[in-house]
Amino acid sequence: MRPPSPSIPEKEFLFSTLEKSLRLDGRGLIEMRPLELTFGEELGHVDCTLGKTRVLAQVDAKMVRPLPERPFEGIISVHSEISPMASPEYESTGRPSDEEVALSRMLDKVIRRSDAVDREALCILAGQRVWHLRLTIHCLSDAGNLLDCACMAGMVALRHFRRPDVEVIGDEVTVHPPSSRAPVPLSLHHTPFSLTFALFAPSSSHTNISSQTAPITLLDPSLLEQRLASGTLSLALNAQRELCVVHKAGGVPLTPEEVLSAVNIAVQKAKELEKMVDARVREDWAMKKIEVR
Amino acid sequence: MSVVLPGELVPAQHVNLKLGPGLQQEAASQVTATRAGILEHSANNSRWWVESNSRRYVPAPQEPVVGVITGRLGEGWRVDIGSAHNASLDALAFEGASRRNRPNLKVGSLIYARVSLAHKDMEPELECFDAQTRKAEGFGELKGGFLVRCSLRMSRNLLDPNHFLLPLLGSRFPLDAAVGVNGRVWISAKEPKQTIAAARCIEGADPDGGGMDQLALKMFLDSLDF
């Protein structure tokens, strides 16, 4: 059953606090909830929590025959599903819900089409054998901003994952099990992070036709903020200031300056996230005692 | 303290036995648990219940709940109380309501009501007055303020007069609160900052969330600015 839209008092209270630049969980307007990464036993198994939003990502690799039109490239597939486990809002009917379609499209853009993974490095024997990476994303709990959490979990899982080492002599392919040779990390071009802003149109009481006020932008919206927002702006970018995706939904007009200032905030956050993710992945690798070359 | 699992036999024996949530009588003197949790009983062993925590509300008669109006339904309204099915609220179930004089509720309004009928095969029904005295006794529409969602355990704790949280908040700033046992708490203070502080304290004290005890919560409250 779809829950009703937020009640009138909730709506009014949220708008009144936003005018005073306050958020319901005490965060600043461009502050994210605390991000936590927990790695599983296996490589490429990550549990990512953003406040109470929680997503689990898992990578596995197997050898397949490449697509005939791309004989030198490995295959990456992203599977995501939002089950009713995440929130009673999502139903387990046969066809995917709008949120699910939006999530899987965004994941596809951020992880696959941004060329984060070097696909040619996944080739073992041209036209014969390549690696097929499968990234599975399970949304365990939705407390707002599921998209950013899912992208983060997916990218961290890819960074954490290591495939078995292979040796090619002539046409002979030897796969070395992890016990004999250390598995090798994937070669990644960059790590894009998705950052979502919720946009609130300035309240009508203050709007003059001559002097338009800027909409209020919030980073990392909570569930209530996300549902009451008049629009969202999702940016996917890496710490090197390379923009991968700009996705704006909803009908709030933004000036170029406002978009640029959002991008600048996102770049700063992406740098912080990159540092943290890098430290956490290394820490976990060191703990698992896999030889880092 | 004893933990029971669903299906487990419970040694509840009394001449005037009253079973609370999580227990059911099967044969003449056989009581089994239907929920996992901690088995509790009153001092004279006459009342027994299972204390557990969950997020999904199952309506039970006479419980106070906070609901959101989701639509009109003939003479009354359809109300979301967080249970599997929507509840219905009759337009005449208010203090001083008559055919001519009905309360003016809109879709999206919050109400504080009591569950008057809860049967497993029927839709729950709500009322906003005491059926005997026909007085509101605090029930009715909740205007302004903010709705906080918490676990069911937390909302029951808040109704406990010995629980520390509401008196602690009340000693810092004036506060109106309506606690529904369906895991929804309506709070209203003069300043939005105070309402936010109260909401964060409820979240912090929730065994499902921060799980802070009295001392930790006091320090948390002192660190907030309101």
Image (cartoon, coloured by chain):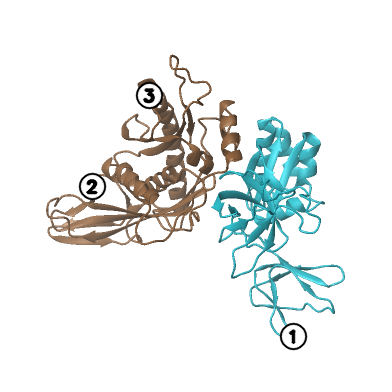
Chain colours: A brown, B cyan
Q: CA distance from mark 2 to mark 3?
A: 31 Å
In the picture of the structure, the residue carrying the numbered disc 3 is A260
Looking at the rendered image, the disc whose residue lies closer to the viewer, 2 or 3, is 3
Residue at the far bottom: name it: B28
**Of residues A8 and A69, which is closer to you in this image?**
A8
Note whether residue A183 is visible.
no
| Residue B202 percent across, percent down from the top left | 68, 45
| Residue A232 percent across, percent down from the top left | 42, 36
**Of residues B197 and A75, which is closer to you in this image?**
B197
- Regarding mark 3 in the picture, which secondary structure is present there? helix
**Of residues A217 and A195, which is closer to you in this image?**
A217
In the picture of the structure, the residue carrying the numbered disc 1 is B28
**What number is the disc on residue A119?**
2
Residue at the far right: name it: B44
- Regarding mark 2 in the picture, which secondary structure is present there? loop
Mark 2 belongs to chain: A
Label 3 neighbour load within 10 Å: few <14, some 14-19, many 20+: few
**What number is the disc on residue A71?**
none
Q: Quadrant of residue A254?
A: top left
**Residue type at mark 1?**
Ala
